[in-house]
Amino acid sequence: MGVKQRDVIKMTQEEIDEFLQGRHSMSIATMNHDGSIHLVAMWYGFLEGAVAIETKAKSQKVLNLRRDPRMSALVEDGESYEELRGVELVGRGEIVDDPERMFQLGISVFERYQGGEYTEEMRPFVEVMLNKRVVVKLHVDRVVSWDHRKLA
């Protein structure tokens, strides 16, 4: 009997962590009031070791999470089938409006996408980025991963 392809392409926890540390966009899915899916691409960072995003406090995804905290996220890359890899995170979104915790995430996102290490001179930029926003921290219940490069 052969090995199931799923078992071959699954990433280890170390590979998942390394992949998520990369500079990618993350697709975030929440449930609309009518049961349809609201899906958007976001930059992300890390708060207290968990994936998190900053978003407008009145955004559709926040309205959805206040009603139903279920949330899924997908980070992927690759141009051809043989290069495809990704991580799906399924769990619950926690809406964070505590300024100190929000600032931690703001620094994480700023460093990841603006480049360079945060310094106090950058504080005004992070503060503007977080104006009228909240942070959504994803508490993960299930992880699915794949790396088609392992098929070679």
Image (cartoon, rainbow, N blue to C red):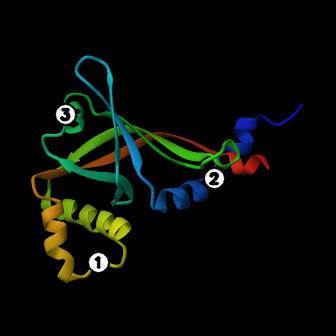
**Residue placed at 16% from the left, 47% from the top?**
56
Q: Quadrant of residue 106?
A: bottom left
Residue that carries the numbered disc 2 in the rendered image: 12
Q: Are marks 2 and 3 in contact (CB under 8 Å)?
A: no
User: Which mark is first along the chain, 1 or 2?
Assistant: 2
Amino acid under disc 3: Arg
Q: What is the residue that sits farthest to the left in this orientation?
A: 132
Q: What is the x, y in percent for residue 123?
A: 17, 75
**Residue placed at 45% from the left, 56% from the top?**
24
Residue that carries the numbered disc 1 in the rendered image: 118
**Residue placed at 54% from the left, 61% from the top?**
18
Q: Are marks 3 and 1 in contact (CB under 8 Å)?
A: no
Q: Quadrant of residue 27?
A: top left
Residue that carries the numbered disc 3 in the rendered image: 66
For residue 80, which numbered disc appears in the image? none
Count neighbours of disc 1 (C-alpha within 10 A) and say few if under 14, some if 14 to 19, many if 20 or more: some
Q: Is residue 86 left or right of residue 40?
A: right
Amino acid under disc 2: Thr
Q: What is the x, y in percent for residue 60?
A: 20, 34
Q: What is the x, y in percent for residue 68?
A: 25, 28
Count neighbours of disc 2 (C-alpha within 10 A) and say few if under 14, some if 14 to 19, many if 20 or more: few
Q: Is residue 102 above or below residue 87?
A: below
Question: In 3D space, how far apart are the residues under numbered discs 3 and 1 (Cα atoms)?
Answer: 31 Å
Amino acid under disc 1: Tyr
Q: Nearer the viewer, residue 38 or 20?
A: 38
Q: Is residue 29 above or below residue 120?
A: above
Q: Are marks 2 and 1 in contact (CB under 8 Å)?
A: no
Count all numbered tags in the image, as a single digit. 3
User: Which mark is first along the chain, 3 or 2?
Assistant: 2
Badge 2 marks a residue whose secondary structure is loop
Badge 3 marks a residue whose secondary structure is helix
